Each structure stands twice: as C-alpha cells, then as structure tokens.
Image: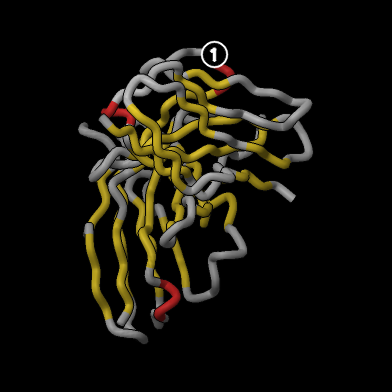
Amino acid sequence: AQRVTQPEKLLSVFKGAPVELKCNYSYSGSPELFWYVQYSRQRLQLLLRHISRESIKGFTADLNKGETSFHLKKPFAQEEDSAMYYCALSGRGSQGNLIFGKGTKLSVKP
Amino acid sequence: DTGVSQNPRHKITKRGQNVTFRCDPISEHNRLYWYRQTLGQGPEFLTYFQNEAQLEKSRLLSDRFSAERPKGSFSTLEIQRTEQGDSAMYLCASSIQGETQYFGPGTRLLVL
C-alpha cells in the first residue's frame, strides 16, 4: 500500500533548538518525496522536493531508501517556522497526484 | 496571475442540497488536481485533469461527485445530494506536467 506516515502530530521546540520532523513512506517503486508547509491563514506551499536537493529556509531533507524515510531537519529553529508541515510522495513517471501524511504541527517557542 | 484561485471560499449548505465549487488554475498549467482535506488529515487526492481530459478518479470520488474542465482552463467540482460526511476543505492545485503543484486557498464546505 502507498502510504506516508508522520508519527508526530505536534512538535514543540524552543527558538534556536534543532528540529527534526519525521516522515516514513511505503511505496512499491521509486517515489518522489516532498515537504509542503502551511503557515497560519496561508495556502499549502512546497517547501522542498528531494530531487532538487536544495536547502530552503534552512531546512534540508535526505531521502533514505533503506529506512524509507524523508525526515525534515533544521539546525536552529526560528519562531517564523511555526506552521503545519506535510510530507508527501508521488510515483516517478506517474500522473503526479500526491499522497500526503497527516501532518505535523511545529510550534517554535521564544 | 496571482496563483490558483478558488470560489467560493466558504459554503454552508443543508444536507441533500447540491453544491458547486470553481477552481481557476495558473494560466499556463495544463494539469489540475482536486483534493479533499478533513480535520486532522492531510489532503487526499480526488481527481485530476490534463487539459480538458479527466485522467484519474480516486475511489473517494463517489457517484455524487462530478468534476469538469470543459475548456482546459477552469474546473468545477459538483457534489450532489450532500451528506454531512462531505464537510471538508476542498483544495485545487495546478501544475505543468511533472512539475511542482501549486495549491489554491481551498473551499471550506459545511453540510448541516
């Protein structure tokens, strides 16, 4: 079954602390992995995708095929990082519809 | 072009009524997707179009749901005989084939 699991509903850290939002996936084939973010009162937007290997707003994510994980990391959290984060996958070469996890709410306290 | 737009933003209806939502994608995007999001869940895929052709429908899309994209530009999603379980946020996204999906602000439906 194709599935994305985000085990934490809520993650609360203090400003300046490291952050890791976990994402595990199940997919038969070679998926593309994404992180989407939704800030308060804003629409869902792409944060990063694994094939681009970029660092966006200080966030990085490495695809670990052995562990089927795509954890999102940031060494020093900022208050403006507080948002809802969704991990998602799509099949490579497929129609591109996304399969999302349930999301993790990140709260960065001052 | 300021991105994907959806109308209305909010809709309250009574059970059994029909509702229709509209999505206007980014103008050069040939793909258009519909997702549904309920409380505490991530978005779930409903259907997608490439130009005017509807190429895939999720099993979540019951017979009461129908989507169209008649000229390959805007799309409509209609729900007939609404049920309380249809209450959700309905999201539209568009993309150029194989590229990033850009989401609209969503239409929040409440069925009383």
For the point 56% across and 43% down, the residue is A97
- Most foreground residue, B30 or A18: A18
- Most foreground residue, B31 or A30: A30
Q: For mark 1, what is the residue?
A: A53
For the point 34% across and 44% down, the residue is B73
Q: How many marks?
A: 1
Image location (x, y in percent) of residue B33: 46, 47
In this rendering, position of residue B84 left or right of residue A6: left
Q: Name the colouring of the figure.
A: secondary structure
Q: Regarding mark 1 in the picture, which secondary structure is present there?
A: loop
Task: Name the residue type under label 1.
Answer: Arg
For the point 42% across and 27% down, the residue is A47
Chain letter of disc 1 in the image: A
Task: Work out which quarter of the rendered image holds the N terminus of chain B and state it.
Answer: top left
Which of the 4 quarters of the picture holds residue B51?
top left
- Most foreground residue, A14 or B19: A14
- Whether B71 is drawn above or below A20: the answer is below
**Is residue B102 among the parts visible in the rendering?**
no
In this rendering, position of residue B11 left or right of residue A83: left
For the point 44% across and 40% down, the residue is A11
Which of the 4 quarters of the picture holds residue A84?
top left
Task: Work out which quarter of the rendered image holds the C terminus of chain B and state it.
Answer: bottom left
Neighbour tally class for label 1: few under 14, some 14-19, many 20 plus, Cα within 10 Å: few
Which of the 4 quarters of the picture holds residue B87?
bottom left
Image location (x, y in percent) of residue A89: 60, 37
Image location (x, y in percent) of residue A106: 39, 38
Image location (x, y in percent) of residue A110: 25, 29
In this rendering, position of residue B51 left or right of residue B12: right
**Is residue A71 among the parts visible in the rendering?**
yes
